[in-house]
Amino acid sequence: MARLIGIDVGYGFVKVTDGEAGYSFPSVVGEGHTRPTFNTGADRFSTIDHLKVGMGKKIYFVGKAAIKHSRFVYRDLSYNRSAGEDFEILFFSALSFFADAAYNEFNVVTGLPVERMHMADSLAKRVKGERSIALFVEGGSREIRLNVKEVEIVPQPLGTYWSLFSGPMGLDAAAPAEGRIGIVDIGFRTTDLAALEDSEFIPEKSKSLTVGLATAYSEIGLSIAARYGLEKESYSLDGIVIKRRINMAGESIDITDIVSEAFEKLATNILVEVNSQWRLSDFDSIILSGGGGQAISQYLLPRISHAKLAADPITANCRGYLAWANRLWNSPSRIGQPQEEYTPQS
């Protein structure tokens, strides 16, 4: 039986869950090698921090391992993410955490920005079907086969909506979903605005904005370079932004002022864009989501009186995708009568 998976392959981080376990790692890919790496500490290697896969005839470090070990590292921010196999590498690396056997079957729900849904069929063809990959673990490697039997691609912010009204086995039919709800899903590369009215997704009132955390990261990187003479790639800024500190010549320096200024500017930018697209007073509630939603919520929430932050906003889409997977592929008796928020693709 195919395992149900929700995957959010974001520009910043990949999030994946089967409902029992969940994983998140930076959306960074690097050139791999077979030279040995050694853990000089007492703890064993953490798989997610030392993710190395073989696809075709190439080896890749993925996530934190790429930042640590690769000479050539990239975080693809392009429109269709078709350079090389960046998306596929991240997608199948995420699935590999749930590969318990040599052959593994999955049904997957994932998402695209609302204005890029025209790419759904092409993306489905890229990931659907069987793929053999090599997993490199401490002391050796093993071949596994991953078969994506079914894949459903939905507008990304719907994951957040479904996460609001889902239980352990999928969507909760009794959940109140009346009125007009606006979701502001702030990611790394894009911000998606999704409008839902009486549980129905309204494409005509939904929009993708080409602004996100990457905009703030660029500002932070320039400020660090100007003040301290340190140049940082976007993928190396993740930990710096989270900790709000940089290390320089053995000294830990607080850069809270730099990060806060960039985040406040980003919040203002997004608020102006949202007000240009929507009349906020027409909505019964506004939900902030995504890693960016969490990062700048303190600047946005006081300026939108009826807005709230989604529970665990970083993984909200991922968890909602899994709820929809249960709606699509689990027996109705397990999840009750489903809501009709979104019509699956044929």
Image (cartoon, grey):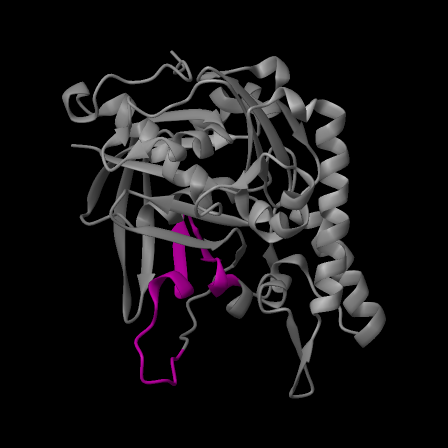
User: Residue at 55% across / 65% down in the picture?
Assistant: 67
Q: Is residue 182 left or right of residue 18?
A: right
Q: Quadrant of residue 211?
A: top right
Does 333 appear above or below 57? Answer: above
Residue 258, image x, y percentages? 75, 65
Image-based side of 150 in relation to 202, left or right = left
| Quadrant the N terminus occupies | top left
Tell which residue pokes out farthest to the front in this image: 305
Q: Residue at x 61, y 28 (%)?
A: 193
Q: Where is residue 51 shown, x and y percent of the image?
A: 40, 60
Rendered location of residue 332, percent (x, y):
19, 19
The residue at 65%/88% (across/down) is 250
Indicate whether residue 42 is drawn in magenta.
yes
- Is 218 placed left or right of 156 in the picture? right
Residue 185 covered by magenta stretch: no
Residue 238 or residue 55, whichever sits in front: 238
Magenta stretch, residue numbers: 38-66
Task: Give the residue at the far right of this rendering.
Answer: 226
Q: Decide: is 131 above or below 219.
A: above
